[in-house]
Amino acid sequence: MVNVNCHLHTPYSFSAFKSIDEALDRAAAEDVKVVGINDFYSTDGYREWKEGCAERGLEPIFGIEFISLNAEDQAAGLRVNDPNNPGRTYISGKGLAYPVTLSGEPLRLLQAVRAESNAQVERMCAKLNAHLAAVGVDIRLDFAKIAAELTRGSIRERHLAKALRMAIAGVSATQVYEKIFGAPAKSDVNDIAAMENEIRSRLLKAGGAAFVPEDPKAFLPMETVQHIIEAAGGIPTYPFLGDDAKGNFTDFEADLQKAADILKRRGIHSAEFITTRNTTAVLESYAGYLEDEGFIVSFGSEHNTPAMEPVKLRTRDAAELSDKLKAINYRGACAIIEHQKAKK
Protein backbone atom coordinates (compact mmCIF):
# COMPACT_ATOMS: atom_id res chain seq x y z
CA MET A 1 0.00 0.00 0.00
CA VAL A 2 1.38 3.41 -0.99
CA ASN A 3 2.26 5.62 1.99
CA VAL A 4 0.32 8.89 2.01
CA ASN A 5 0.50 12.07 4.14
CA CYS A 6 -2.19 14.57 3.12
CA HIS A 7 -1.49 17.35 5.64
CA LEU A 8 1.94 18.94 6.04
CA HIS A 9 2.70 22.52 7.04
CA THR A 10 5.73 24.26 5.57
CA PRO A 11 7.69 27.44 6.38
CA TYR A 12 5.00 29.32 4.44
CA SER A 13 3.03 29.15 7.71
CA PHE A 14 4.99 27.48 10.54
CA SER A 15 6.73 24.14 10.33
CA ALA A 16 9.21 21.79 11.91
CA PHE A 17 10.85 21.76 8.46
CA LYS A 18 13.38 24.45 7.62
CA SER A 19 12.38 24.30 3.95
CA ILE A 20 10.07 22.58 1.49
CA ASP A 21 13.10 20.66 0.23
CA GLU A 22 13.65 19.23 3.71
CA ALA A 23 10.00 18.18 3.97
CA LEU A 24 10.05 16.45 0.61
CA ASP A 25 13.47 14.87 1.17
CA ARG A 26 12.18 13.36 4.41
CA ALA A 27 9.03 12.12 2.67
CA ALA A 28 11.08 10.46 -0.06
CA ALA A 29 13.48 8.91 2.46
CA GLU A 30 10.53 7.43 4.39
CA ASP A 31 8.89 6.11 1.21
CA VAL A 32 5.89 8.45 1.46
CA LYS A 33 4.75 8.80 -2.13
CA VAL A 34 1.78 11.20 -1.83
CA VAL A 35 2.25 14.44 0.10
CA GLY A 36 -0.12 17.32 0.80
CA ILE A 37 0.91 20.91 1.53
CA ASN A 38 -1.61 22.45 3.94
CA ASP A 39 -0.49 25.87 5.22
CA PHE A 40 -2.56 28.37 7.19
CA TYR A 41 -4.08 31.07 4.96
CA SER A 42 -1.51 30.50 2.23
CA THR A 43 -1.09 28.96 -1.22
CA ASP A 44 2.30 30.62 -1.68
CA GLY A 45 4.26 27.38 -1.45
CA TYR A 46 2.38 25.55 -4.19
CA ARG A 47 4.82 26.11 -7.05
CA GLU A 48 7.82 25.08 -4.95
CA TRP A 49 5.86 22.04 -3.68
CA LYS A 50 4.84 21.02 -7.19
CA GLU A 51 8.35 21.33 -8.60
CA GLY A 52 9.94 19.60 -5.60
CA CYS A 53 7.52 16.68 -5.89
CA ALA A 54 8.25 16.33 -9.61
CA GLU A 55 11.99 16.16 -8.91
CA ARG A 56 11.48 13.33 -6.40
CA GLY A 57 8.73 11.37 -8.14
CA LEU A 58 6.13 12.27 -5.50
CA GLU A 59 2.44 13.03 -6.06
CA PRO A 60 1.42 16.46 -4.68
CA ILE A 61 -1.85 17.41 -3.01
CA PHE A 62 -2.63 21.12 -2.64
CA GLY A 63 -4.39 22.20 0.55
CA ILE A 64 -4.98 25.16 2.82
CA GLU A 65 -6.17 25.68 6.41
CA PHE A 66 -8.34 28.31 8.08
CA ILE A 67 -9.64 29.02 11.57
CA SER A 68 -13.30 29.92 11.16
CA LEU A 69 -16.16 30.76 13.48
CA ASN A 70 -19.58 29.14 13.56
CA ALA A 71 -21.91 31.59 15.30
CA GLU A 72 -24.56 28.94 16.00
CA ASP A 73 -22.10 26.66 17.78
CA GLN A 74 -20.56 29.60 19.63
CA ALA A 75 -23.95 30.72 20.92
CA ALA A 76 -24.64 27.18 22.11
CA GLY A 77 -21.26 26.99 23.89
CA LEU A 78 -20.36 24.01 21.71
CA ARG A 79 -16.70 23.03 21.47
CA VAL A 80 -16.08 21.84 17.92
CA ASN A 81 -12.45 21.11 16.99
CA ASP A 82 -10.86 23.75 19.18
CA PRO A 83 -11.16 22.25 22.68
CA ASN A 84 -10.88 25.63 24.42
CA ASN A 85 -12.99 27.99 22.31
CA PRO A 86 -16.65 27.21 21.60
CA GLY A 87 -17.63 27.76 17.98
CA ARG A 88 -14.09 28.22 16.74
CA THR A 89 -13.66 25.70 13.93
CA TYR A 90 -10.62 24.68 11.93
CA ILE A 91 -11.45 24.01 8.28
CA SER A 92 -9.08 22.66 5.63
CA GLY A 93 -9.39 22.79 1.88
CA LYS A 94 -8.16 19.77 -0.07
CA GLY A 95 -7.39 19.45 -3.76
CA LEU A 96 -7.20 23.15 -4.64
CA ALA A 97 -6.59 24.02 -8.27
CA TYR A 98 -3.00 24.48 -9.40
CA PRO A 99 -1.99 26.89 -10.80
CA VAL A 100 -3.89 28.90 -8.19
CA THR A 101 -7.08 30.42 -9.63
CA LEU A 102 -8.37 32.39 -6.64
CA SER A 103 -9.34 35.97 -7.51
CA GLY A 104 -11.88 38.70 -6.79
CA GLU A 105 -13.74 38.81 -3.47
CA PRO A 106 -12.59 35.36 -2.25
CA LEU A 107 -8.95 36.41 -2.74
CA ARG A 108 -9.57 39.73 -0.99
CA LEU A 109 -11.12 37.93 1.99
CA LEU A 110 -8.19 35.51 2.22
CA GLN A 111 -5.67 38.37 2.11
CA ALA A 112 -7.63 40.34 4.72
CA VAL A 113 -7.85 37.51 7.24
CA ARG A 114 -4.16 36.72 6.75
CA ALA A 115 -3.26 40.38 7.31
CA GLU A 116 -5.34 40.48 10.50
CA SER A 117 -3.72 37.28 11.76
CA ASN A 118 -0.28 38.82 11.18
CA ALA A 119 -1.36 42.05 12.88
CA GLN A 120 -2.47 40.13 15.96
CA VAL A 121 0.99 38.57 16.25
CA GLU A 122 2.58 42.01 15.82
CA ARG A 123 0.52 43.28 18.77
CA MET A 124 1.65 40.24 20.73
CA CYS A 125 5.29 41.02 19.88
CA ALA A 126 4.92 44.55 21.27
CA LYS A 127 3.39 43.19 24.47
CA LEU A 128 6.15 40.59 24.77
CA ASN A 129 8.79 43.31 24.47
CA ALA A 130 7.03 45.30 27.19
CA HIS A 131 7.09 42.25 29.45
CA LEU A 132 10.81 41.67 28.80
CA ALA A 133 11.53 45.29 29.75
CA ALA A 134 9.37 45.03 32.89
CA VAL A 135 11.28 41.98 34.19
CA GLY A 136 14.68 43.48 33.38
CA VAL A 137 15.65 41.28 30.44
CA ASP A 138 17.66 43.23 27.87
CA ILE A 139 16.16 41.57 24.78
CA ARG A 140 13.86 43.24 22.27
CA LEU A 141 12.29 41.36 19.37
CA ASP A 142 12.16 43.12 16.01
CA PHE A 143 8.88 42.11 14.38
CA ALA A 144 9.96 43.18 10.90
CA LYS A 145 13.16 41.17 11.22
CA ILE A 146 11.23 38.11 12.42
CA ALA A 147 8.88 38.43 9.46
CA ALA A 148 11.77 38.77 7.02
CA GLU A 149 14.09 36.09 8.41
CA LEU A 150 11.86 33.45 10.02
CA THR A 151 8.72 33.49 7.88
CA ARG A 152 7.47 33.33 4.30
CA GLY A 153 4.73 35.90 4.85
CA SER A 154 2.37 34.23 7.33
CA ILE A 155 3.45 35.06 10.87
CA ARG A 156 2.32 32.85 13.75
CA GLU A 157 2.79 33.12 17.49
CA ARG A 158 5.15 30.15 17.18
CA HIS A 159 7.52 32.43 15.25
CA LEU A 160 7.66 34.74 18.29
CA ALA A 161 8.44 31.80 20.54
CA LYS A 162 11.19 30.71 18.17
CA ALA A 163 12.67 34.21 17.95
CA LEU A 164 12.71 34.61 21.73
CA ARG A 165 14.24 31.19 22.26
CA MET A 166 16.98 32.06 19.73
CA ALA A 167 17.62 35.40 21.43
CA ILE A 168 17.92 33.77 24.85
CA ALA A 169 20.19 30.90 23.79
CA GLY A 170 23.42 31.06 25.76
CA VAL A 171 25.12 30.35 29.04
CA SER A 172 22.70 32.45 31.12
CA ALA A 173 19.54 31.00 29.55
CA THR A 174 18.39 29.34 32.78
CA GLN A 175 18.41 32.65 34.67
CA VAL A 176 16.74 34.54 31.81
CA TYR A 177 13.88 32.05 31.59
CA GLU A 178 13.34 32.27 35.33
CA LYS A 179 12.99 36.04 34.99
CA ILE A 180 10.55 35.99 32.07
CA PHE A 181 8.43 33.13 33.49
CA GLY A 182 8.59 34.33 37.09
CA ALA A 183 9.64 30.78 37.98
CA PRO A 184 12.14 28.20 36.72
CA ALA A 185 11.60 26.72 33.27
CA LYS A 186 9.92 23.33 33.31
CA SER A 187 11.81 22.14 30.24
CA ASP A 188 15.46 21.51 29.52
CA VAL A 189 16.70 24.85 28.17
CA ASN A 190 18.69 22.96 25.52
CA ASP A 191 15.60 21.20 24.19
CA ILE A 192 14.61 23.53 21.34
CA ALA A 193 11.11 22.19 20.72
CA ALA A 194 10.22 21.92 24.41
CA MET A 195 11.42 25.46 25.19
CA GLU A 196 9.55 27.01 22.27
CA ASN A 197 6.40 25.20 23.34
CA GLU A 198 6.88 26.38 26.93
CA ILE A 199 7.40 29.99 25.85
CA ARG A 200 4.21 29.79 23.82
CA SER A 201 2.13 28.22 26.57
CA ARG A 202 3.41 30.40 29.45
CA LEU A 203 3.73 33.77 27.73
CA LEU A 204 1.64 33.85 24.55
CA LYS A 205 -1.47 31.86 25.39
CA ALA A 206 -4.45 33.04 27.47
CA GLY A 207 -3.22 34.07 30.93
CA GLY A 208 0.32 34.73 29.68
CA ALA A 209 2.04 38.09 30.03
CA ALA A 210 2.10 38.67 26.25
CA PHE A 211 -1.30 37.23 25.36
CA VAL A 212 -3.39 39.34 23.02
CA PRO A 213 -6.94 38.20 22.28
CA GLU A 214 -7.64 37.75 18.59
CA ASP A 215 -9.75 40.40 16.93
CA PRO A 216 -13.04 38.98 15.60
CA LYS A 217 -11.84 40.07 12.14
CA ALA A 218 -9.32 37.21 12.31
CA PHE A 219 -12.12 34.64 12.07
CA LEU A 220 -14.26 34.40 8.98
CA PRO A 221 -17.65 32.67 9.24
CA MET A 222 -17.48 28.98 8.41
CA GLU A 223 -19.71 29.48 5.36
CA THR A 224 -17.35 32.15 4.02
CA VAL A 225 -14.33 29.88 4.46
CA GLN A 226 -16.14 27.12 2.59
CA HIS A 227 -16.88 29.59 -0.21
CA ILE A 228 -13.21 30.61 -0.47
CA ILE A 229 -12.09 26.98 -0.60
CA GLU A 230 -14.65 26.13 -3.27
CA ALA A 231 -13.74 29.24 -5.28
CA ALA A 232 -10.14 28.00 -5.22
CA GLY A 233 -11.30 24.66 -6.60
CA GLY A 234 -10.94 22.79 -3.33
CA ILE A 235 -12.97 20.44 -1.14
CA PRO A 236 -14.04 21.86 2.25
CA THR A 237 -12.73 19.41 4.86
CA TYR A 238 -13.45 19.10 8.56
CA PRO A 239 -10.39 18.17 10.71
CA PHE A 240 -11.52 15.84 13.50
CA LEU A 241 -9.68 16.01 16.80
CA GLY A 242 -10.88 12.58 17.88
CA ASP A 243 -9.87 11.25 21.30
CA ASP A 244 -7.42 13.17 23.43
CA ALA A 245 -4.82 11.63 25.74
CA LYS A 246 -7.50 11.02 28.39
CA GLY A 247 -9.96 9.51 25.92
CA ASN A 248 -12.21 12.58 25.82
CA PHE A 249 -13.96 14.10 22.80
CA THR A 250 -15.25 17.60 22.14
CA ASP A 251 -18.96 18.33 22.42
CA PHE A 252 -19.39 18.30 18.65
CA GLU A 253 -17.44 15.10 17.99
CA ALA A 254 -18.63 12.93 20.89
CA ASP A 255 -21.72 11.82 18.93
CA LEU A 256 -20.18 10.80 15.61
CA GLN A 257 -23.44 10.13 13.79
CA LYS A 258 -24.80 13.54 14.79
CA ALA A 259 -21.54 15.25 13.81
CA ALA A 260 -21.58 13.54 10.39
CA ASP A 261 -25.19 14.57 9.80
CA ILE A 262 -24.48 18.20 10.73
CA LEU A 263 -21.38 18.36 8.52
CA LYS A 264 -23.35 17.02 5.55
CA ARG A 265 -26.12 19.56 6.15
CA ARG A 266 -23.44 22.26 6.12
CA GLY A 267 -22.09 21.04 2.79
CA ILE A 268 -18.96 19.34 4.12
CA HIS A 269 -18.35 15.84 2.79
CA SER A 270 -14.65 15.44 3.53
CA ALA A 271 -12.89 14.78 6.85
CA GLU A 272 -9.31 14.45 7.99
CA PHE A 273 -7.40 13.31 11.06
CA ILE A 274 -3.92 14.09 12.41
CA THR A 275 -3.14 10.50 13.27
CA THR A 276 -0.73 10.95 16.19
CA ARG A 277 -3.57 12.51 18.18
CA ASN A 278 -5.62 9.32 18.22
CA THR A 279 -5.49 5.66 19.20
CA THR A 280 -5.70 3.11 16.42
CA ALA A 281 -9.05 1.83 17.69
CA VAL A 282 -10.69 5.26 17.72
CA LEU A 283 -9.18 6.24 14.37
CA GLU A 284 -10.39 3.03 12.73
CA SER A 285 -13.85 3.50 14.23
CA TYR A 286 -14.26 7.17 13.30
CA ALA A 287 -12.57 7.06 9.90
CA GLY A 288 -14.33 3.84 8.91
CA TYR A 289 -17.74 5.20 9.90
CA LEU A 290 -17.21 8.46 8.02
CA GLU A 291 -16.05 6.66 4.88
CA ASP A 292 -19.14 4.45 5.04
CA GLU A 293 -21.21 7.65 5.30
CA GLY A 294 -19.76 8.84 2.00
CA PHE A 295 -17.04 11.17 3.29
CA ILE A 296 -13.66 11.48 1.66
CA VAL A 297 -11.32 10.65 4.55
CA SER A 298 -7.63 11.56 4.65
CA PHE A 299 -4.84 11.62 7.22
CA GLY A 300 -1.81 13.79 7.91
CA SER A 301 0.85 14.68 10.47
CA GLU A 302 0.74 18.52 10.42
CA HIS A 303 4.38 19.14 11.46
CA ASN A 304 3.30 22.64 12.56
CA THR A 305 5.19 22.55 15.86
CA PRO A 306 8.96 22.76 16.50
CA ALA A 307 9.15 19.00 17.09
CA MET A 308 10.38 16.92 14.15
CA GLU A 309 8.37 13.72 13.80
CA PRO A 310 8.28 11.07 11.05
CA VAL A 311 6.47 11.96 7.83
CA LYS A 312 5.29 8.36 7.54
CA LEU A 313 2.09 8.28 9.54
CA ARG A 314 1.55 6.54 12.85
CA THR A 315 -1.10 6.64 15.56
CA ARG A 316 -0.74 7.60 19.21
CA ASP A 317 -0.34 3.96 20.24
CA ALA A 318 1.29 2.35 17.20
CA ALA A 319 4.44 2.92 15.16
CA GLU A 320 2.52 2.84 11.87
CA LEU A 321 -1.01 2.81 10.51
CA SER A 322 -2.97 -0.42 10.38
CA ASP A 323 -3.75 -1.88 6.96
CA LYS A 324 -7.34 -0.66 7.32
CA LEU A 325 -6.20 2.90 7.98
CA LYS A 326 -3.65 2.85 5.16
CA ALA A 327 -6.40 1.77 2.76
CA ILE A 328 -8.79 4.50 3.91
CA ASN A 329 -6.08 7.14 3.56
CA TYR A 330 -5.08 5.86 0.12
CA ARG A 331 -8.66 5.95 -1.15
CA GLY A 332 -9.10 9.45 0.25
CA ALA A 333 -5.93 10.67 -1.43
CA CYS A 334 -7.00 9.13 -4.75
CA ALA A 335 -10.33 10.97 -4.55
CA ILE A 336 -8.58 14.28 -3.80
CA ILE A 337 -6.08 13.81 -6.61
CA GLU A 338 -8.85 13.00 -9.11
CA HIS A 339 -10.63 16.16 -7.96
CA GLN A 340 -7.43 18.17 -8.54
CA LYS A 341 -6.98 16.75 -12.01
CA ALA A 342 -10.57 17.61 -12.92
CA LYS A 343 -9.84 21.27 -12.10
CA LYS A 344 -7.05 21.57 -14.67
Image (spheres, rainbow, N blue to C red):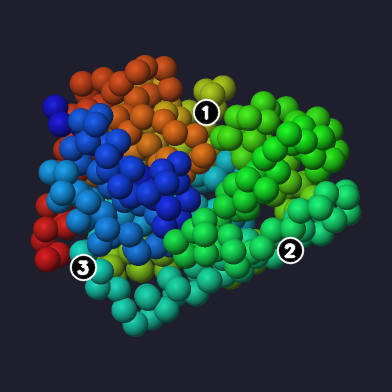
Q: Earlier in the sequence, mark 3 or mark 1?
A: 3
Determine the residue located farthest toward the top in the rendered image: 318
Q: Where is the N terminus found, in terms of image quarters?
A: top left
- Residue ID for mark 1: 244
Name which quarter of the figure residue 75 lies in: bottom right
- Residue ID for mark 2: 126
Determine the residue located farthest toward the front in the rendered image: 171
What x and y, as percent, mark residue 127? 76, 60
Determine the residue located farthest toward the bottom in the rendered image: 104
**Secondary structure of residue under mark 2:** helix
Q: Are marks 3 and 2 in contact (CB under 8 Å)?
A: no
What x and y, as percent, mark residue 294? 22, 43
Can see residue 75? yes
Q: Earlier in the sequence, mark 3 or mark 2?
A: 3
Q: On residue 99, which mark appears?
A: 3
Horizontally, residue 58 falls left or right of residue 183, namely: left
**Secondary structure of residue under mark 3:** loop
Q: Residue at x 88, y 50 (%)?
A: 136
Q: CA distance from mark 3 to mark 1?
A: 37 Å
Please name whichever residue, 279 or 121, is drawn nearer the observer in this view of the structure.
121
Q: Residue at x 63, y 64 (%)?
A: 143
Mark 3: which amino acid?
Pro
Mark 2: which amino acid?
Ala
Q: CA distance from mark 3 to mark 2?
A: 37 Å
Can see residue 72? no
What x and y, as percent, mark residue 280? 36, 21
* Nearest to viewer (mark 3 / mark 2): 2
- Image position of 113 with respect to 89: above or below: below
